[in-house]
Image (cartoon, grey):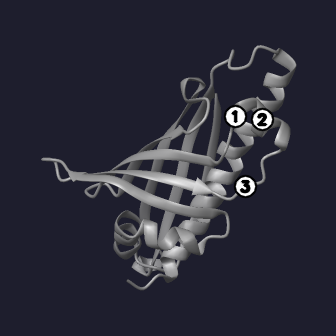
Amino acid sequence: MKSFRSLVVLKRPQDELWTIMRDHLPEIAPRVADIEQVREIERSTGADGAVRIVNRWQVRAVVPQAIRTMLKLHELAWIDRNTWDAANRICTWSIEPCFLTQHIACAGTTSFAPAMGGQGARVTFEGMLELKPGFLPLGGIEKLVTGFVESVATTIIPRNLRAVVEAAAVYRP
């Protein structure tokens, strides 16, 4: 298992940033260089008031041709299933990649806390990635692909989230 964590403090009140991230993500995402699009697939509100959203992320990333061929990877994309708990200002999420789905598990939380005397927000993004072995028949190649997948989860995803939150901080609906 590989863990990752990212923290950003922004000058936008917590409640505003929370609402923008939850309700306007597909509008904000294209403003980030690495993200091609985020498309909301499903949205519902539970009896507990939690908002559940399913998004499909598609990113612009350079994937080495050898890895692309091995994984039969046409695009770098994933499904994000998240639950927004307004009472605690925590979004719990899981990511299902559009490749090696049975071999990759990734989940975590994004929490929003007040900062700068209420004038800003502290956003903490943290999660865990688990790669289950055996997705390629040749062990040496699997190590190369494992390194690539870990790189995506521990650098690209947190970097993109940070960029999205920064874009949300200046977004005006």
The residue to which callout 1 is attached is 72
Quarter in which the N terminus is drawn: top right
Residue type for callout 3: Ala
Q: Is residue 93 visible?
A: yes
Residue 19 horizontal/vertical position (percent): 34, 69
Q: Earlier in the sequence, mark 2 or mark 3?
A: 3
Which residue occupies 52% across, 56% down?
A: 124
Mark 2 Cα-neighbour bin, 10 Å: few <14, some 14–19, many ≥20 = few
Mark 2 in CB contact with mark 3 (< 8 angstroms): no
Residue type for callout 2: Thr
Callout 3: helix, strand or loop?
loop
The residue to which callout 3 is attached is 61
For residue 158, what is the image quadrant? Answer: bottom right
Q: Which mark is residue 69?
A: 2
115 shown above or below 91: below
Which residue occupies 18% across, 53% down?
A: 49
Which residue occupies 84% across, 36% down?
A: 66
Residue type for callout 1: Lys
Mark 2 in CB contact with mark 1 (< 8 angstroms): yes
Mark 3 Cα-neighbour bin, 10 Å: few <14, some 14–19, many ≥20 = some
Residue 132 horizontal/vertical position (percent): 63, 20
> Of tags 2 and 3, which is closer to the observer?
2
Callout 2: helix, strand or loop?
helix
Could you give the CA–CA distance between mark 3 and mark 1, rounded to whole angstroms? 15 Å
